[in-house]
Image (cartoon, coloured by chain):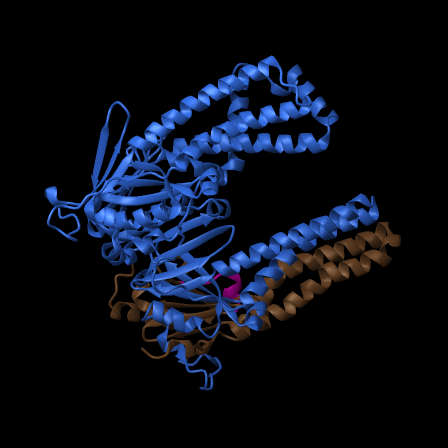
């Protein structure tokens, strides 16, 4: 597994620019070749852990007696270790990189021609290969580190250019010391041309490295049904009914007879594996040859699909905003997806299918694409003004709701059944209560932390949700109506749910649990010209509704 | 810009027609309370006829589960609704409040108004009432003012139509 080390990359992009040019390392300034971190060699030895571990276990089990077969394996291991290490050493010694500076120029960031700063990577043992990319063409710099990398304090750096991600055209350096990688990223991005990035018609293409996010979607559950269903259909097609097969029946009886503490996790693992396969298959089918681009200044186009190819064109005038969606699992893996808030994509169901702009992908990539769609930095986390948090009572409301709807009914049913039939269920009841309470409290806190709203330039920004954390950036002048929803509970708590109506996307976008005394002011500030005439100062006496007075 | 945090949203100026209470009562009777009471009555009769022994526990159960909720809904809902429902036509926007337990206040600017519909249902006609629906391009922006008298509804829809034409906007 790999995870981006720094989630706030786009925010650092502009901020790092002056710093990097001031303090630019002497190496970078003179354009000297730099080496990878020697710890890379240790990373290459990581594969040894599994065979050595298994051998050690065998040796333990047999009481330290090493058989001839084991000696043979050990010998093979030693030889391959020597070969791999030698290759690794040569590769390490022969891989170098540098950032060149045009002669006689100090800071001019890539204004084309031969005078541009470039990022060069030289590698190869027999065939020497030099790859050189002008810095202003670099769009993304991605740092990923597997657990082994992290253990050794190194990280892999990948620099992607516009339209890269197809195949392995990225420049990658494996591996650099983590601080060194951070510094290099700042250097690379300092000269990445923001304007060129905004004017680049191609916003994103599929990168198969994103496949690692596929199992983190809902489809890991749906995938089980997909795989099982298609398997069943194939068998059905050749006239076999699965549960009449001897093997299947035998498997079931053995499963029932085996130790449950072993078989249950095994089955669970198998289901997850099956689901992951299904999720990956679906990801490939849905996002094959995915490409998001501005076909001209006014139309955005998404093309994707393997067997069913889809192409959705969105007019810029109808594009009202962008939704950054981070479902719980995907968020844990550092990923996100992007959806368009656009009019004319059809009804709710069609809109859901057609508004996807980016498959599950790294969060930094999602922020970049969202920014490219808006043609402005995505005003979420990276924006200068952070979102206004919601009142504390919203946290209490989330806790109470979770306890009331998740913990209480299950525990009550189990306890009731336990009292009526068997005391085993009583234990189930309290275990259920304890576990779900912990989960509910954690989710409630996460949901509360997600809550936030604000105004950033021409956009209304609102974030909410924990199972699916959605950050919405909505054009303020697209808001067609405001709705304030309350219940006796929210009125007592002093909060209100505000809904912005737009003629696009899901039509209504909720901002839950705003402070009741701040909501009207916020609504008026976010979309002027709607509700000002109905606002009063808190001090003034509120006139009660009259009867039919024309 | 004036300090926005201090401003509160006041309720709309005009209440709906008082006859709306009777309309809502009738609606509750037809849709929910009536069927619930009918079920309770049928079960009591059946129990009396065939299982008189069940009455001591069935009676209180029916009372708690069916009769009390039905009657309280019938009594409380229309009054509560009448206290909440209100509307106002401002210079820039239409403003309506509705609901009873869950209350909703919605404001849509006249520049976004697309159509104004006046609907008189069969029950509403009995009490001389009408519902005015102001639609915008967004389904989450439609304003519904229920329980207006015929005259008020006509007057309101005419005025919204005029105002919407007077206020420049593309209604998009």
Q: In the rendered image of this protein, which colour is used for chain B?
A: brown
Image point 39% across, 70% down: which residue? A522
Q: Which residues are magenta?
A: B118-127
Q: Position of residue B74 (x, y in %)?
A: 64, 67
Image point 34% across, 32% down: which residue? A92
In terms of depth relative to the viewer, which is nearer, A21 or A387? A21
Residue A524 relative to residue A432: left or right: left
In terms of depth relative to the viewer, which is nearer, B27 or A93? A93
Which residue is the extreme one toward the right? B53
Q: Position of residue A59 (x, y in %)?
A: 64, 23
Q: Is residue B105 visible?
A: yes
Residue A157 relative to residue A110: left or right: right
Which quadrant does the C terminus of chain A fall into? bottom left
Q: Position of residue B9 (x, y in %)?
A: 44, 76
Q: As displayed, is residue A364 above or below residue B81?
A: above
The chain coloured blue in the image:
A
Q: As displayed, is residue A448 above or below residue A118?
A: below
Q: As displayed, is residue A527 above or below residue A302?
A: below
* Corner quadrant of residue B108: bottom left
């Amino acid at each position: 597994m790999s995870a981006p080390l720094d989630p706030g990359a786009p925010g650092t992009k502009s901020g790092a620019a002056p710093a990097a040019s001031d303090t630019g390392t002497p190496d970078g300034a003179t354009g000297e070749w730099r080496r990878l971190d020697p710890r890379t060699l240790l990373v290459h030895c990581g594969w040894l852990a599994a065979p050595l571990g298994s051998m050690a276990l065998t040796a333990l089990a047999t009481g330290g007696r090493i058989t001839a077969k084991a000696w043979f394996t050990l010998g093979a291991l030693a030889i391959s270790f020597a070969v791999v290490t030698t290759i690794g050493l040569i590769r390490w010694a022969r891989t170098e990189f540098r950032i060149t500076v045009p002669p006689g120029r100090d800071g001019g960031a890539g204004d084309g021609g031969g005078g541009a700063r470039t990022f060069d990577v030289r590698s190869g043992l027999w065939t020497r290969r030099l790859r050189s990319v002008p810095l202003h063409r670099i769009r993304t710099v991605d740092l990923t580190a597997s657990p082994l990398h992290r253990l050794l304090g190194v990280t892999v750096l990948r620099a992607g250019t516009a339209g890269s991600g197809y195949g392995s055209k990225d420049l990658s350096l494996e591996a650099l010391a983590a601080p060194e990688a951070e510094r290099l990223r700042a250097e690379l991005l300092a000269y990445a041309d923001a304007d060129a990035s905004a004017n680049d018609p191609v916003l994103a293409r599929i990168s198969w490295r994103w496949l690692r996010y596929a199992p983190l979607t809902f489809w890991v559950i749906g995938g089980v049904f997909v795989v099982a269903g298609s398997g069943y259909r194939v068998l059905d097609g050749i006239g076999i009914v699965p549960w009449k097969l001897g093997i299947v029946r035998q498997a079931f009886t053995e499963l029932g007879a085996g130790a449950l503490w072993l078989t249950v996790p095994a089955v669970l693992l198998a289901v997850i594996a099956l689901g992951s396969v299904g999720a990956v298959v679906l990801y490939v089918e849905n996002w094959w040859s995915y490409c998001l681009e501005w076909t001209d200044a006014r139309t955005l186009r998404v093309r994707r699909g393997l067997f069913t190819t889809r192409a959705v064109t969105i007019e810029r005038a109808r594009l009202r905003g962008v939704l950054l969606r981070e479902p719980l699992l995907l968020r844990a893996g550092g990923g996100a997806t992007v959806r368009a808030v656009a009019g004319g994509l059809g009804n709710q169901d069609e809109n859901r299918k057609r508004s996807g702009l980016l498959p599950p992908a790294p969060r930094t990539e999602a922020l970049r694409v969202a920014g490219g769609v808006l043609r402005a930095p995505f005003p979420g986390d990276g924006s200068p003004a952070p979102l206004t948090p919601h009142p504390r009572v919203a946290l209490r409301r989330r806790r109470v709701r979770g306890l009331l709807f998740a913990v209480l009914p299950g525990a009550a049913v189990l306890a009731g059944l336990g009292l009526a039939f068997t005391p085993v269920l009583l234990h189930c009841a309290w275990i259920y209560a304890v576990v779900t309470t912990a989960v509910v409290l954690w989710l409630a806190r996460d949901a509360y932390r997600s809550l936030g709203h604000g105004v950033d330039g021409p956009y209304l920004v609102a974030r909410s949700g924990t199972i699916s954390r959605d950050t919405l950036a909505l054009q303020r002048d697209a808001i067609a109506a405001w709705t304030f929803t309350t219940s006796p509970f929210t009125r007592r708590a002093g909060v209100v749910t505000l809904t912005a109506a737009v003629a696009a996307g899901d039509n209504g976008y909720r901002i839950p649990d705003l402070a009741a005394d701040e909501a009207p002011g916020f609504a008026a500030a976010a979309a002027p010209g709607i509700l000002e005439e109905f606002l009063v100062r808190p001090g003034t006496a509120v006139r009660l509704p009259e009867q039919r007075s024309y | 810009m004036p300090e926005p945090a201090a401003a509160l949203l006041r309720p709309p100026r005009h209440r709906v027609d008082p006859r709306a209470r009777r309309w809502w009562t009738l609606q509750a009777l037809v849709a929910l309370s009536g069927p619930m009471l009918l079920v309770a009555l049928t079960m009591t009769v059946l129990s009396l006829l065939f299982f008189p022994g069940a009455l001591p526990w069935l009676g209180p159960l029916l009372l708690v589960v069916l009769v009390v909720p039905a009657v309280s809904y019938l009594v409380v809902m229309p009054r509560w609704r009448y206290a909440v429902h209100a509307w106002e036509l401002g210079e820039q926007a239409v403003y309506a409040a509705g609901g009873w337990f869950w209350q909703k206040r919605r404001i849509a600017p006249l520049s976004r108004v697309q159509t104004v519909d006046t609907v008189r249902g069969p029950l509403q006609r009995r009490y001389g009432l009408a519902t005015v629906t102001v639609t915008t391009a967004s389904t989450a922006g439609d304003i519904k003012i229920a329980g207006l008298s015929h005259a008020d509804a006509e007057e309101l829809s005419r005025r919204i139509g005029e105002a919407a034409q007077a206020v420049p906007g593309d209604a998009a």
